[in-house]
Amino acid sequence: MKTLKLNDLLHIRQENELWFANNERSVFVSTKAFGAMQRDLIENIGINRMKTFFFKYGYQLGVEDAQEVAKKDSLNLLEKIQYGPIIHALKGHAKSHITEKEFEVEGNEIKSFRFKGVWENSYEAEQHLKNFGISQGPVCYTLTGYATGYVTGVVGVDVFFKELQCQGQGAPCCVWEGRLVSEWKDEAEEFFSYSKELPILKELEQTNEKLMLEKNNLALVSKTYNEMTNELIKGNNIDSILDILHKQNQYPIVVEDSRQHVLAYKGINLEDLESIRYTFSEIPDKKQCHSKVGIFSFENGTRLMTPIYLLGQVVGNCSFLYQRERTPNYEIDSMILDRLASICSLLFLKEKTEVESMEQVKGHFLEEIISGKYTQQEIMRKADFIQLDLSNHYHIVALTYKFLNTCDEKEFTLHKKTFEMVSAYLREEENINVLIGQRPDTLILLITEKQVPQQNLEKTTRALVSFLKKHIKNALFLAGISSQNSNILEAGVAMEEACSAVRLSSRDEPITLFGDLGMLGILINDQNEQAIKKMIRDYLGVLYENLDKNKLELIETLYHFLDQGGNLDQTAESLALSKSGLRYRLNKITDLLDCDLRDPQRQFQLMMALKALKIVEHERIKKILAE
């Protein structure tokens, strides 16, 4: 028998051609073989499980050496700790030494423990560089496992050693630090969580169970979706679809539009819904199982909500409500809720298509009425088909709009959007059945007095304009309202009245009644247009000749001056001009007209001419301003 004593800590002997280290049978393994195992483990079980494997391996080596050192009663606790790097080096793992130490014991309790040191020529880092090249993080898992196991075994409390830099990352040497686990907090959790991982077979079993559960969940969701789709194909409404869901899960279900108006509900009454809907609050830190699903809390439960999309826009939302005693299955319920939202999207699309088709029919009907294509009896009969009584008084409203600046949307899209919003507002908010026709940059609305009395029409129109301004930011909306008409065959005349009135509307006063035009409204028609232009020429003189942008600027200044009763302060404010700038323009106008702008008779004549100009030369003015 041959015995080799390297020092007091490591005894190697050969017996019957077998090697023993400190009375434990040992084998010699080349670092190249270790590197091959390292490579195979990473390729087959992944880097994270490989960390666990080598950390546990090193930990066990460290614990075994600690048990040998613990038998030496002649050494104090600090000396036993310091022997760890020596044994580590003797076994060929790395050249190891301590650079910093902080160790305090009070009685049998370790008050502080902090050691730092260096590993040089780590066999583990060496093999990693050969097999994989430079790593993104530390790679000496057996070394950190060994240090952790050795010191834990010696001191009897949990410690953790971590690499601060590693040769495997391209550093000149490995720098390590050891502390009590309680001091590392979350930094040690990564390695200890890896060491608690399930065996691969057990993990595969659990994965298979999860897959089976997921398969069953998907089967249930698919079955539910098919049932809802069948109801949709049959032409049934949203109530029928909600019945299917409510019978299946017994949850209260609510479908709302984008303005939070309830469209359909099951399992809850409106009074209860109204009492809780203002207490909804989002749960931001709740793990959500679907990107579009929001989880909210309310006084007595939880709400699961997802949006309904139509042509890329949110047009409503679907919700499941849960009382406190019910625990939502967020994963499966969110999938079902998402399918419900898809069905609602299809229903909304169907409804939108039907409404648009009807509005197109009604718009075409209005165009034919204005063109005089039908007799009065034919108009009344056709109006019955769309539930509209045209036998009584009515008004025409001309709603013009101008897009103030360019935007990402195409002009056609903006025209279409404006038409849809006007139609939806009057139908849903005001509950009015109107005929809507289209002209370039203008909507023509026929509104009967049975639905909106004359005294309320201006208020209704003003509310419509305010709604449009709120939702379409880059447009100016102006309206003109015709006089009261009783003969539907005169709809064309009423339309001309409304179009004449809207030409006098402005940003400050966006709505003009035809009645506000006074005698001017009666005088202006196709038969006397030339006479009106002569009157304009007589009163405006040089200002009217060879119209251009500069003269239109002076005409606008004069109009506001007269409209404000000659008040300089109010005129300057409405034109966003300084008073000196306003005086300069007024002096220029006075010189061009050669008249006293303060003369009441002259003011009346000029105002009549300016209003007439805005009406009869509307297209010409618009063309000049567009140049």
Image (spheres, rainbow, N blue to C red):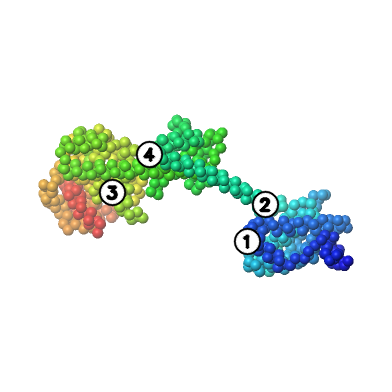
User: Which residue position holds label 2?
Assistant: 199
Residue beneath the point at 67% across and 63% down: 38
The answer to the question of whether label 1 and label 4 lie on touching residues, with beta carbons closer than 8 A, is: no
**Mark 2 or mark 4, earlier in chain:** 2
Residue beneath the point at 50% across and 39% down: 303
The answer to the question of whether label 3 and label 4 lie on touching residues, with beta carbons closer than 8 A, is: no
Q: Secondary structure at mark 2?
A: loop
Eye-nearest disc, 3 or 4: 4
Which mark is drawn over residue 234?
A: 4
The answer to the question of whether label 3 and label 2 lie on touching residues, with beta carbons closer than 8 A, is: no
Which mark is drawn over residue 172?
A: none
The residues bearing labels 1 and 3 have C-alpha atoms spaced at a distance of 67 Å
Which is more toward the observer, 90 or 460? 90
Residue beneath the point at 33% across and 54% down: 410
Which is more toward the observer, 203 or 186? 203
Image height check: is 99 above or below 109?
below
The answer to the question of whether label 1 and label 2 lie on touching residues, with beta carbons closer than 8 A, is: no
Q: For label 1, count other residues whose C-alpha is less than 10 Å away and answer few (under 14), some (14-19) or many (20+).
A: few
User: Which residue position holds label 3?
Assistant: 401
**Mark 1 or mark 3, earlier in chain:** 1
Q: What amino acid type is highlighted by mark number 3?
A: Tyr
Eye-nearest disc, 1 or 4: 4
**Mark 1 or mark 4, earlier in chain:** 1
Q: Secondary structure at mark 3?
A: strand
The residues bearing labels 1 and 2 have C-alpha atoms spaced at a distance of 17 Å
Q: What amino acid type is highlighted by mark number 2?
A: Pro
x and y percentages locating residue 341 in the rendered image:
44, 43
The residues bearing labels 3 and 4 have C-alpha atoms spaced at a distance of 42 Å
**Mark 1 or mark 2, earlier in chain:** 1
